Image: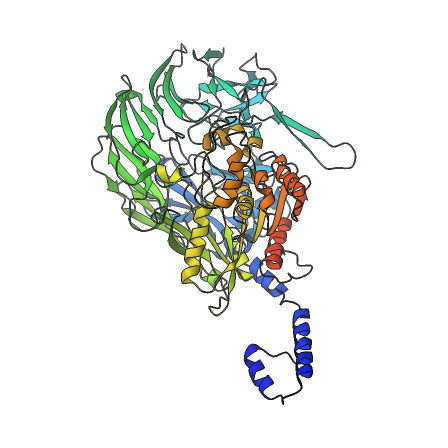
Amino acid sequence: MLIASPGQGRQYFSDIKPMKTSSAFFLLAVFLIASCNTKPESVSEVDYKRAEKFLRVNTAPLVVGMISGQFWLPNDILVYKNSKKEGWEYVKVSPATKEKKIVLDNEKLAAALLKFGEKEIKPNELEISNVDFSADGSTATFNVESKRFKVDLSNYELKVADLWKRSEHISPNGKLAAHIKDNNLWLRDLETGKDTQLTFDGQKDYGYATNNAGWIKSELPVLLWSPNSDKIATFQHDGRGVGEMYLYNTKVGHSKLEAWKYPLPGDSLIFRVERVVIHLGPKPKIVRLKMQADMHRSTISDHIAAQSGELLDAEWSTDESQLAFVSSSRDHKSATLRVADTSTGEVRTVMNETVPTYFESGSGAVNWNVLKESNEAIWFSERDDWGHLYLYDLSSGKVKNQITKGNWRVMDVQFIDKEKRIIYFTGSNKEEGDPYFHYLYSIGLDGNNLQRLTSENADHNITWSKTKQYFTDVYSTPATPPISVIRNLKGEAVMELEKGDISNLTATGWVAPIPFTVKARDKQTDLYGLMYKPSNFDAGKKYPILNYLYPGPQSGSVGTRSFQPARGDKQSLAELGFIVVEVDAMGSPGRSKSFHDAYYGNMGDNGIPDQITMIQQLAATNPWMDLEKVGIWGHSGGGFASTDAILRYPDFYKVAVSGAGNHDNRNYEDDWGEKWQGLLVKNPKPTALGDAGKKVDMEIQKAKVETSYDNQANQLLARNLKGKLLIAHGMMDGNVPPTNTLLVVDALMAADKDFDMLVLPNAGHGFGNGRYFTKKRWDYFVRHLKGQEPPSGFVFAENVK
């Protein structure tokens, strides 16, 4: 039977002669039955292949002129890694002479590796990692897979490099390596290989330099080398009495149980650290600081160690006679600056700052510094609602003057010229345009002569030379490729390094994300986000909406405002026929303190009211956005938030995909929940849970509120599920234990709700971008939000990254 389009139908039926009523009804019935039996249009394999084309593994090689590694050598010589059409190159430049030359010859290096017994590798396909250069630039060390080599760049002779281990912490002079053995700290001489034991009283759950925050753990010791490599600041890590977490793998036969210390909010005991200074030499000496144990806390992270294993919130004086550090309270509300005598262990308190919610010393970097030579300290504070720097007297602990001020924030203190009393720092929110763009500034310690050193309206990434006379500036926007230059201390461009070229990328049909600005839930505050449209966008069509979110509170959904050829798989999802949107909601960092505090104590908010109003505003001006078909997804904190969204706002979000969510922070590590939700209180007075979703909130209010964490527990909302939910977790997730997801699953089953669950045996926390789960997520949205069938048997050609 002919089934016409609506326009054709009118003409088709006008040609039919009048018939009896019964016959007319019969024809109409047949027509309707045929229409109902027609399968919805499928998303084709061609669509999936086009989507795959926009994953990072395929887009990154198409961008030329992107710098991905920088090495400043002494005498202001720079070596950097640059992408080119044929692969990559390492370039050596001198800003003084403007000379530029290739420093690593890929053909010679590939040939040298072949002679050394490695398999034949085409020069443009050579993959090396962990590259480093000697101080004079004459040699380079690098990894090829798991092997480490050292190459003489004058003749390309290779030898196996000194085998440093990922579990070792190398000294500044490159001669010593600290490592943990049998709960004690040891030192290895990298020239002789000799091992020396430094501590002797370490024991199980009470070892030295232990790298365990519960959610993350490592064999790499946590410590801070002194400038001259003859002292180590570290701690004895007290986990005695702390509760454990358990995981078990999937295998034939007996599973292997993994058990480790993992404190939770409300636990009576959490990790403590007893600070020590170790003096090296023929007879190592341990000086234990004369103070009570500190809580395992830092002012910028839920760990006391950086990724490199460097001890956070600690700083040596130049002469190594004192160690400055900050002690943070368990609830993160109180931060105390202290100075210790490294010879005697005597500790003096300089000053304290206590705030109503949580104290941070910066956004991604510790921004306090002690200037022993001038008896001063630089302190970062948000006391006037913006992140600014203050100059303190080190003896009295009193403020001398405020260094920076205004409705903008300091992001990262980069360099302090102590002689000229000038501080160089990155800042945001000060210039016109996107408030998340970072710029470099300088200012006197007296608060005068503020200078902007990077003028382009873009996001600027800074790397300093060792002499601090030059810095590289790589600037870009989400839509424009990077330009990299070397500048002097006045901000003047000394020489251009590379200019990003995306012509090969755009030739594939790639389209840049579209920046937008909307109002927050308060109808006053501006929010900034990105929109992704299909490369074959048709304004005459109606597109379902996909909302990506990561609620933070330690970061936002959008991430860096620098150029990236792919931002996860957001453009790929757009290619499947969706409009994808993301926004940094209230409650995320990078703006004012009040903006960041928006849902302190109520993590069940997750910024979702701002996500919803963002989508509504965009749809009001873009009729091709279908408000009746809105989906949401996220991983980790985003997995928590996406499930929360479909349960708390079941009439708005129709489909959700949730990966590795910390659905109830009583089952997640203590530092996270106690910083953003506060200390766990039993039987608190009921409090309002936000303006939006009041019906759901009131249902929770009527129920017995047992703890101050009830307002963020997704399992308490399970009865509200209406749409389609895919909830997933890796069974070896040592970051967010799988019990977080199983709590929600148990509640959904008890409420007789239909949902989909994916368990990934032996998978850790980072499965969200893996090929299997990515494909599963694509299929789920196509099937349940578009109402179409995904292609059968599609397999990614490359690994998903």
x and y percentages locating residue 296 in the rendered image: 49, 23
Expressed as whole percent of the image width and height from the top left, the position of residue 99 reads 35, 48
- Near-viewer residue (558 or 723): 723
Residue at (64% x, 61% y) in the render? 790
Left or right: where 779 falls relative to 574 = right
Q: Residue furthest front?
A: 21
Q: Residue 281, relative to residue 720: is it above or below? A: above
Q: Is residue 86 visible?
A: no
Residue 232 in the image: above or below residue 527: above
- Return the residue nearer the eye: 420 or 73: 420
Counting from the top left corner in percent of width and height, residue 729 is at 63, 41
* Residue 402 at x, y percent in the picture: 25, 30
Q: Which residue lies at the image location 36% right of the left edge and 25% below the top edge?
A: 354
Work out which residue is located at the far right of the displayed protein and give it. Answer: 253
* Quadrant (top left, top right, bottom left, bottom right) of the N terminus: bottom right
Q: Residue furthest left?
A: 448
**Residue 619 placement: quadrant:** bottom left
Q: Residue at x 55, y 43 (%)?
A: 639
Q: Is residue 732 left or right of residue 124?
A: right
